[in-house]
Amino acid sequence: MTDMPVFAIKAQDVLAPRVIDMYAALCVSHGLEWQAGQARLAACEVRQWQADNPDRVKIPDHAHVPTG
C-alpha cells in the first residue's frame, strides 16, 4: 500500500491508448527512452485488448477516488 495518489487508466477506456502515447512522447522529451518504450508496450497491449474486446470499450465514466 502506498500513501501517494495513483492515477490508473483501464484498458476499457477508449482514450487510454492515446493518453499512453502522449505519456511516451513526454518521456522522450525528457530523455527517458526506456520508460517511453515501456509506455509504448503498454499502449500496444491496450490496443490489442480493445480490438479483442470491442464490446467492453467505453468512454470514461468513473469518479475520482481520493486517497485520503
Image: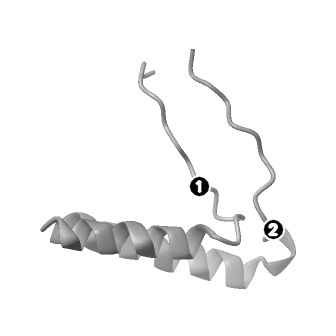
Name the amino acid type tagged 1: Ile
The residue identified by callout 1 is 9
Which residue does the image show at 52% across and 43% down from the upper left? Answer: 7
Which residue does the image show at 25% across and 63% down from the upper left? Answer: 35
Label 2: state its secondary structure. Answer: loop
Left or right of 55 on screen, residue 43: left
Q: Quadrant of residue 10?
A: bottom right
Q: Answer with mark 2 or mark 1, whichever residue precedes in sequence.
A: 1
Q: Residues within 10 Å of mark 2 (few under 14, many from 20)?
A: few
Q: Quadrant of residue 68?
A: top right
Please state the horizontal and vertical placement of residue 5, each as a whole percent of the image. 47, 30
Label 1: state its secondary structure. Answer: loop
Image quadrant occupied by the N terminus: top left
Q: Residue furthest bottom?
A: 51
Task: Work out whether 54 lies above or below 60.
Answer: below
The residue identified by callout 2 is 58
Left or right of 18 on screen, residue 51: right
Disc 2, disc 1: CB below 8 Å? no
Q: Residues within 10 Å of mark 1 (few under 14, many from 20)?
A: some
Left or right of 43 on screen, residue 14: right
Name the amino acid type tagged 2: Lys
The one nearer the camera, 20 or 50, is 20
Please state the horizontal and vertical placement of residue 42, each as a whole percent of the image. 45, 69
